[in-house]
Amino acid sequence: MRIVLVKPGSLVRDAAGNILYASSSVTLIISDRILVVDTGSADERERVFDGLKRAGVSTDDIEIVVNTHLHVDHTGCNDIFRNADVLSYHTGLREGCVLAEGVSLMETPGHTLDSISVLCSENVVIAGDALPTADNYIKDLPPRIHVDRALAMRSMHRIAGIARIVVPGHGMPFSIPDGRETELA
């Protein structure tokens, strides 16, 4: 299995903590099928194209797009994956669904009630906004935007208990337990 960060997510806030700009991480998984987890914001299409090209694949090669939830900063480039099945909690993805060899789903609600994360056999969790940044992990804080704080914390702790590496919704991959940025490959 090969896991490639196509582009890191970003999150820009003002001094009061209000979000000025957000775009999710985009992660490529090559197993017996080719998947992308989250597609970022619509204004980052070129970065997605470039990242896929660097990984040696095109949008036409992608068989499955998984949206960790349906906020526009995670779904903005869904339309460029013309050959892919676009899947989410709302299309029937549930805990334990297997999408490819070594790739399954975890329900991780709290940020939204429909949040899911992708678990890869190497103990890599692509968390979406269930664990949006390394800072959330290091400071043990829930996503700032959440529908249920306790549920968000349970999901975040569950991810941290399983993962060796986390690809957060907004930032670079980091390792558990120290929270330092790390390489996927």
Image (tube, helix red, strand yellow):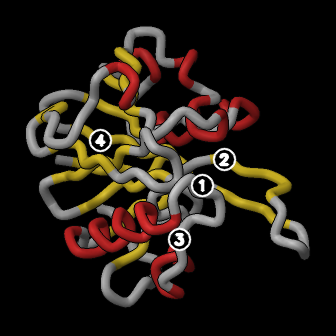
Q: Position of residue 66 (x, y in %)?
A: 38, 32
Q: Which residue is mark 2?
A: 23
Rounded to the nearest angstrom, the CA distance separating label 1 from label 2 is 5 Å
* Amino acid type indicated by mark 1: Gly
Q: Amino acid at mark 3?
A: Pro
Residue that sits furthest to the left in the current view: 101
Q: Is residue 149 rendered to the left or right of residue 157?
A: right
Which amino acid type corresponds to the residue marked 2 in the rendered image?
Ser
Give the structural element (helix, strand or loop) at label 1: loop
| CB atoms of marks 4 and 3 within 8 Å | no
Q: Label 4 crowding class (10 Å Cα cut-off): few <14, some 14-19, many 20+?
A: many
**Residue 76 occupies quadrant:** top right
Q: Earlier in the sequence, mark 4 or mark 3?
A: 4
**Label 3, on which residue?**
142
Q: Are marks 3 and 1 in contact (CB under 8 Å)?
A: no
Front position among marks 2 and 4: 2
Quarter holding the C terminus?
bottom left
* Local secondary structure at mark 4: strand
- Distance between the alpha carbons at the discs numbered 4 and 3: 27 Å
Labels 1 & 2 near each other (Cβ < 8 A)? yes
- Front one among 135 and 1: 135
Which mark, by number, is residue 29?
4
Q: Residues within 10 Å of mark 2 (few under 14, many from 20)?
A: many
The residues tagged by marks 2 and 4 sit, at their Cα atoms, a distance apart of 19 Å
